[in-house]
Image (tube, rainbow, N blue to C red):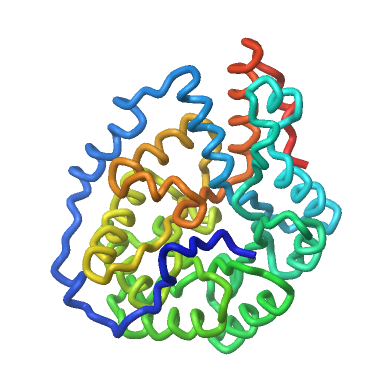
Amino acid sequence: MSHADPHHTRNPGMPLDPAMFDRVRVNKQASERRAAGFGARRSVKKTHQAAWLVNAIRLIDLTTLSGDDTPGKVRRLCAKARAPVAPRIADVLGIADMGLTVGAVCVYPTMVPHAVEALQGSNIPVASVATGFPAGLMPLDLRLREVEWAVAQGAAEIDIVITREHALLGNWQALYDEISAMRDACGAAHMKVILATGELETLTNVYAASMVAMQAGADFIKTSTGKEGVNATLPVSLTMVRALRDFGEATGHRIGFKPAGGIKSAKEALAWQVLMKEELGRDWLNPDLFRFGASSMLGDIERQLEHHATGRYAAAHRHAMS
């Protein structure tokens, strides 16, 4: 199942409306100044920090997207998804009975059946990348078939990639048509649209592509595949989050956000949550509207929580993902 919130309706999409983005110009320097404050000026300490880190665990799409993925590796990752904090830490923190899990497990399509089996009865959804991930440079009909296949195997969420060429050339109708077709292929599965922002050249392109994705029916917009040279950054995230806010004000629909790629530390988990809370409010600190695409970050969060619980740092290998 998906972490869908019954209190807000799914984005149905709308006709392409360039007027919502074609006159928007994003000031890179102003965005960078604003983004710098989320990690530098806001300080969360002690018990409050531990609470924010526990919440971050709920928001993680625990991910393995490697060429050496195997069913056994995926099963071990799913075991970690079910019990993301070691019992000895959970007991000291008083969270042993809260049913803490990650937000989802994200894998390649061929690994979906193994993840679905390993997570049976857990209520943790399986997410799958699709549409020729990470480059997306496959014929559209094959990309759509890949989405349909992953959904048929049990994926409740699909992370699709766009054709970057459409955004770089300003061919917004082609981008809209492509994403709309992918949304149809997803059916009941929620669709996260990966913009690969490190390849879109400007924040103005990022804003426009975000808006087109939401108009085409995106349930989430996502920064990166994790395979680009530049992945999730706070200025890019700020631009996308403000597009979310503008779209919500115009349509009444709340869209989720997922930064991914290169997010590895507990400190980063705090900074992105501060961004979401300050820009969009507390509702975006829940897994139906916010996810981290990450794996190694969970190990650092668990290490920080152990320090909070015991006053000592454990070696990194004590918090292996699988």
Q: Give the answer, above or below, for where 193 lies relative to 59.
A: below
Q: Residue at x 70, y 46 (%)?
A: 81
Q: Residue at x 20, y 72 (%)?
A: 20
- Quadrant where the image shows the C terminus: top right
Q: Give the answer, above or below, for where 179 lies relative to 238.
A: below
Label count reads 0
Name the one closer to the observer, 49 or 178.
49
Point out the residue furthest to the left here.
Answer: 23
Residue 301, image x, y percentages: 59, 31
Residue 15, image x, y percentages: 30, 85
Location of residue 92 (image quadrant): top right
Name the one closer to the observer, 41 or 249.
249
Q: Give the answer, above or below, for where 181 lies relative to 94.
A: below
**Left-right relation of 55 to 246:** right
Q: Residue at x 78, y 60 (%)?
A: 120
Q: Residue at x 68, y 53 (%)?
A: 64
Point out the residue furthest to the top here.
Answer: 311
Residue 168, image x, y percentages: 33, 71
- Quadrant where the image shows the N terminus: bottom right
Q: Give the answer, above or below, for where 113 lies relative to 184.
A: above
Residue 277, image x, y percentages: 34, 42
Point out the residue furthest to the right here.
Answer: 72
**Left-right relation of 193 to 214:** right
Location of residue 321 (image quadrant): top right
